[in-house]
Amino acid sequence: MRPGLRGAGWALRRAVLTRPAPRRRPPEVASPPQKRFHGEGYQEGYEEGSSLGLIEGRQHGTLHGARIGSEIGCYQGFAFAWRCLLHGCATEKDSKKMKALESLIGMIQKFPYDDPTYDKLHEDLDKIRGKFKQLCSLLNVQPDFKISAEGSGLSF
């Protein structure tokens, strides 16, 4: 090949190398159909998530409420049984037990079963548990409250 003359392949390579790259939209700029589908997808996802959230929240609330109700019911049954057992006794020790027993029954009766938004629900529940433990100590019993798949209850 002589200097100054180039082969046919050189012209093709030169055309490819000097041609400007095709212009593309930046990926962050979406076309109108993409925006629409994105918005519709978001809306559908939001509605589906809200629906599932309500279902799961209701299930969780039912389960948690049932546990609290079962626990309170056991305390109440325990207190009523001991009130019947101690009713005829008149010793000073038994009067202290009866005061604690009546206090526990009063706390249970004032407990807001039907108001899950009650601000002091957990505080009141802790007070009831504390009073129950105090009463068990006075009565010299060792309760064991269990919640299981078969049900819940106190055992001694």
Image (cartoon, rainbow, N blue to C red):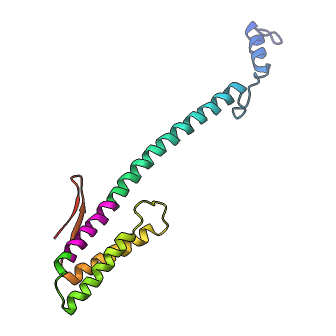
Residue 139, compared with residue 56, is above or below; it is: below
- Along the line of sight, the residue nearer the viewer: 143 or 99: 99
What residue appears at the point 43 percent right and 46 percent down from the top-left corner?
Answer: 56
As for residue 46 lying within the magenta part, the answer is no
For the stretch drawn in magenta, the main secondary structure is: helix
Left or right of 132 in this view: 52: right
Residue 34, image x, y percentages: 67, 27
What residue appears at the point 41 percent right and 72 percent down from the top-left corner?
Answer: 124
Left or right of 95 in this view: 119: right
Location of residue 97 by image quarter? bottom left
Q: Residue furthest top?
A: 8
Determine if residue 136 is in view. yes
As for residue 76 lying within the magenta part, the answer is yes
Residue 139, image x, y percentages: 20, 81
Q: Residue furthest front?
A: 88
Location of residue 136 by image quarter? bottom left
Q: Quadrant of the C terminus?
A: bottom left
What residue appears at the point 18 percent right and 91 percent down from the top-left corner?
Answer: 91
Residue 114, compared with residue 13, is above or below; it is: below
Residue 120, compared with residue 54, is above or below; it is: below
Q: Quadrant of the N terminus?
A: top right
Total numbered circles? 0
Residue 62, image x, y percentages: 38, 52
What residue appears at the point 21 percent right and 53 percent down from the top-left corner?
Answer: 150
Which residues, given as a range, are shown in magenta? 69-83
- Along the line of sight, the residue nearer the viewer: 118 or 137: 118
Left or right of 11 in this view: 89: left
